[in-house]
Image: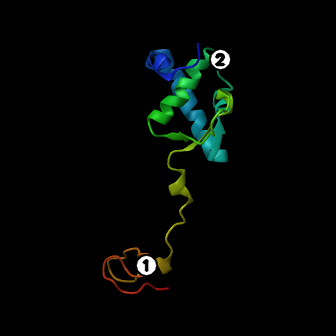
Amino acid sequence: MSYNYNNEKHKIFTEEGQREFLKVRDRTQKLLAEAGAFTMSSAIEDLYGDSWLMMAYIDRLIELGEIREITPANVAGQHRVFVSAVWESLLTPPLTDEDWCGCETMSPTTEAGKCSRCGKNANR
């Protein structure tokens, strides 16, 4: 028998399961803040007990849209790698003054370098 999230999921919703789930969630958020990614083993290394349930905590975070898996195929469970589900948006640089047209709407410019509201050329 091998790990199956659907077989473990109901255990997450017990009182003890919720306490442990929140520990795992806090740990994953800390790991993401420190390194931007984490492995399954690093997320559950301080926990003791049912390893399949611990894996289910991580899969629940995926289900909730908090993290996503970037592991290639055929990787052992403890070596699965995860990143924030919104990490791409974090890599987008913030808008600068040059990205605004200067009109009172202060709209960001389009790809063509024009204000998306008034159509004026941006301050480029």
Numbered disc 2: secondary structure: loop
Residue linked to disc 2:
48
Residue type indicated by callout 2: Tyr
Q: How is the image coloured?
A: rainbow
Identity of the residue drawn at 35% across and 76% down: 116
Residue at x-position 55% and y-position 19%:
53
Q: Which residue is mark 1?
A: 100
Please identify the quarter of the rendering in which residue 103 is found. bottom left
Residue furthest front in the image: 74
Residue 2 x %, y %: 59, 17
Left or right of 26 on screen, residue 11: left
Q: Residue at the spot x=44%, y=17% of the render?
A: 10
x and y, in percent, of residue 62 in the image:
49, 35
Q: Nearer the viewer, residue 86 or 73?
A: 73
- 34 in relation to 26, above or below: below
**In this rendering, is residue 78 above or below 15?**
below
Rendered position, 62 above or below 113: above
The structure residue drawn at horizontal position 54% and vertical position 51%, both measured from the top left corner, is 87
Q: Is residue 81 left or right of residue 65?
A: right
Which numbered dot is residue 66?
none
